[in-house]
Image (cartoon, helix red, strand yellow):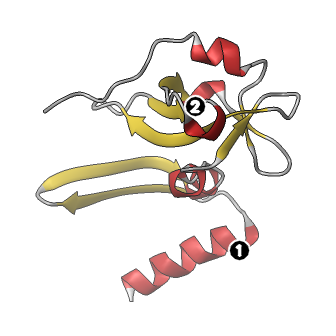
Amino acid sequence: MKKLLSSAAVLTVIAIGTPLPVTAQHVAGGVVIEYNDLDIAVVATGWSVVGLLRGDVYNSNGDFVGYVHDAIVLPDGDATFVIVNVAGFLNIGEKLIALPAAAFEINDDGDLVLPNASKDNLKSLPRFQYARN
């Protein structure tokens, strides 16, 4: 019954958009996870990484400047970086760069926008390489 009420509360928030602060403590894999004053409505306004992957990136003028290759959350969870491929024509000369997620916006059409970016200035940024384990 408790699960049913919790699910109903979450669905109500999603359906009507009313903020519902949540304070709870859960155990996941032996680790205690605390949610203090978590506002589910705010979480729901975030970006879906799955939706962004392989999506195009534009500048404020609507020019294509690359596409999302990956997203990385730092081990401490403090920052997320978007890995953008700024490849040339027909993906010749692939170059991956890492940019903080805070640098991006989403326009009214749902496109990922990197204000004031150009392909040339993005290509001049240092190449991102994955760590070798």
- Mark 2, secondary structure of its residue: loop
What is the three-letter code of the residue carrying label 1?
Ala
Q: Quadrant of residue 79?
A: top left
Q: Position of residue 4 (x, y in %)?
A: 44, 86
Q: Residue at x 53, y 24 (%)?
A: 99
Q: Position of residue 121 (x, y in %)?
A: 67, 12
What label sits on residue 87 in the rendered view? 2
- Mark 1, secondary structure of its residue: helix
Q: Nearer the viewer, mark 1 or mark 2?
A: 2
What label sits on residue 15 in the rendered view? 1
What is the C-alpha distance between the residues marked 1 and 2? 41 Å
Q: Is residue 24 left or right of residue 94?
A: left
N-terminal-most mark, 1 or 2: 1
What is the three-letter code of the residue carrying label 2?
Ala
Please tell me which residue lies in front, 47 or 69.
Answer: 69
Q: Residue at x 61, y 57 (%)?
A: 44
Disc 1: CA contacts within 10 A as few (<14), some (14-19) or many (>=20) = few
Quadrant in the picture for the C terminus: top left
Q: Residue at x 34, y 25 (%)?
A: 129
Q: Quadrant of residue 125?
A: top right
